[in-house]
Image (cartoon, rainbow, N blue to C red):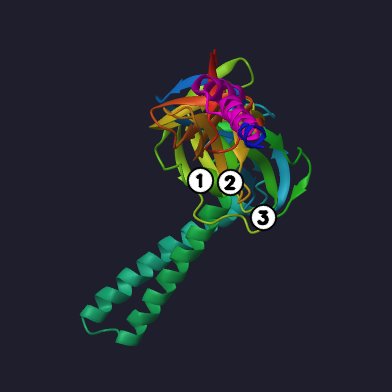
C-alpha cells in the first residue's frame, strides 16, 4: 500500500516537472514571436527644405483703357479720316461734322463781343467823370459778360466739329460712317489704350490674402510670350455673387498684343520650410485633420498633423513634420498609432 502511494506521488511529481519544463519561459521563443508580430512598412526618408510659395492667377490681357468717343453736338458726319485699327495720337481727328452756319455764328459772336467791350469802356469813362450812373455801368458789365459767354459758346461749337482722340491709342471700331447723322452724346468711335497692357484676374479669398500692390511676377501669354508684370490694383471688396476679388497687373511690354488673350500670372511669395511629399501619403483623421504617418526613432507608428503649404507638379508641400522624418509610403493602412513596425527604406 505504501509502495503504491509512493509510486503515485512520484508519477505526479514527474508529470508536473515535465509540464513545467514544456511550458516554461524561453527567451529565444519570445523574441521570435515578437518579431513575427511586427508588421513591415516601407518608408521614405524626407528632409525639410526651403520652398518658395507661388500664387498662380488665371485671367486675360486687356487694354489699359477702352473709351467710347462721343459727339458733343449734332450734325452730319462728313469725314472719318482714321480707319479701324489705325494707330492715332491724342488730338487726331476721328470724325468730322458738317459746320453749317457755325463759323458765321462765331464771327457774329466775336463782333458782338468787341462792341460790348467798346461800350463798356465808354460807359466806364463816363461813370468815372460823373456823366453816367452806376446803373448804366452795371448794365454795360452785364452786356459784356453775356457777349463773352456767347463768343465762348460759338468757339466751342466750332471746336466740337472735329471729334478727336483723347489719348494715344488704337481706333478699335468706328461707330458712324460718312453721310450719317450724329446726335450729341452718340459715340463716333471706340478707342483702346494698349500702352500699357493690363493683366486682370478674379482671385479667391484664400489667394487675395497673399497679394499686395507692387508685387512682381511673370505673365505667360500662350507659349510665345512670358513677360514681367507688377500688381497695381487689388479690389477692396469681393464680388457679391462670385465672392472673388479683381486684381490688375501692369505688363512690361515693348509691343502691343491683341486685347482679350487668355493668360496666367505667377507671383513668387515668401520662402517657408516644408516637406515635399507624394499626395498618397496624406490621410484624414476622423475629425478631418490632415495628417501623415511616420515611424519614430523607437520604430513605432506616429500620426503627425500637417498643414498644406502648396501644390505643385512635383508633389504636395506640407509643414508640421520634424526636420527629418521617415514617412510611411506603403503599408500605412495596416498599422495603427503606437504599433511597433519593421522598416524598409525605399526611394521617394
Q: Residue at x 76, y 37 (%)?
A: 178
Residue labelled with disc 1: 208
Q: Quadrant of the N terminus?
A: top right
Query: In which quadrant of the rendered view does residue 324 lie?
Result: top left
CB under 8 Å between discs 1 and 2: yes
Q: Is residue 214 magenta?
A: no
Q: Which residues are magenta?
A: 7-36
Horizontal arrangement in the rendering, residue 117 relative to residue 279 (left or right): left
Secondary structure under badge 3?
loop
Cα–Cα span, label 3 and label 2: 39 Å
The residue mark sitting in front, 1 or 3, is 1
Nearest the viewer among 112 and 235 is 235
Q: Is residue 13 magenta?
A: yes
Query: Which mark identifies residue 204?
Result: 2
Residue labelled with disc 3: 185
Q: Quadrant of the C terminus?
A: top right
Our reading of the magenta stretch's main secondary structure is helix
Amino acid at each position: 500500500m505504501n509502495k503504491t502511494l509512493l509510486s503515485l506521488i512520484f508519477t505526479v511529481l514527474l508529470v508536473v516537472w515535465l509540464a513545467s519544463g514544456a511550458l516554461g519561459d524561453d527567451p529565444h521563443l519570445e523574441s521570435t514571436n515578437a518579431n513575427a508580430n511586427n508588421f513591415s512598412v516601407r518608408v521614405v526618408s524626407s528632409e525639410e527644405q526651403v520652398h518658395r510659395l507661388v500664387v498662380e492667377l488665371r485671367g486675360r490681357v486687356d487694354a489699359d483703357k477702352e473709351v467710347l468717343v462721343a459727339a458733343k453736338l449734332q450734325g452730319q458726319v462728313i469725314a472719318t479720316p482714321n480707319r479701324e485699327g489705325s494707330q492715332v495720337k491724342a488730338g487726331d481727328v476721328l470724325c468730322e461734322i458738317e459746320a453749317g452756319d457755325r463759323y458765321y455764328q462765331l464771327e457774329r459772336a466775336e463782333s458782338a463781343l468787341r462792341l460790348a467791350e467798346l461800350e463798356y469802356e465808354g460807359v466806364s469813362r463816363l461813370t468815372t467823370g460823373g456823366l453816367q450812373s452806376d446803373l448804366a455801368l452795371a448794365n454795360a458789365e452785364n452786356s459784356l459778360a453775356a457777349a463773352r459767354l456767347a463768343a465762348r459758346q460759338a468757339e466751342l461749337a466750332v471746336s466740337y466739329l472735329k471729334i478727336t482722340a483723347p489719348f494715344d491709342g488704337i481706333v478699335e471700331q468706328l461707330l458712324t460712317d460718312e453721310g450719317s447723322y450724329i446726335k450729341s452724346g452718340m459715340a463716333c468711335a471706340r478707342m483702346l489704350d494698349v500702352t500699357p497692357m493690363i493683366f486682370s484676374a478674379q482671385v479667391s479669398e484664400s489667394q487675395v490674402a497673399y497679394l499686395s500692390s507692387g508685387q512682381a511676377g511673370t505673365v505667360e501669354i500662350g507659349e510665345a510670350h512670358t513677360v514681367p508684370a507688377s500688381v497695381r490694383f487689388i479690389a477692396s471688396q469681393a464680388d457679391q455673387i462670385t465672392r472673388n476679388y479683381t486684381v490688375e497687373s501692369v505688363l512690361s511690354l515693348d509691343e502691343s498684343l491683341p486685347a482679350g488673350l487668355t493668360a496666367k500670372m505667377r507671383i513668387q511669395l515668401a520662402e517657408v520650410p516644408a516637406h515635399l511629399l507624394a499626395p498618397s501619403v496624406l490621410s484624414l483623421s476622423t475629425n478631418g485633420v490632415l495628417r501623415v504617418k511616420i515611424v519614430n526613432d523607437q520604430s513605432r507608428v506616429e500620426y503627425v498633423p500637417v498643414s498644406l503649404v502648396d501644390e505643385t507638379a512635383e508633389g504636395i508641400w506640407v509643414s508640421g513634420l520634424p526636420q527629418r522624418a521617415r514617412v510611411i509610403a506603403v503599408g500605412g493602412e495596416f498599422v495603427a498609432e503606437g504599433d511597433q513596425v519593421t522598416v524598409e527604406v525605399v526611394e521617394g
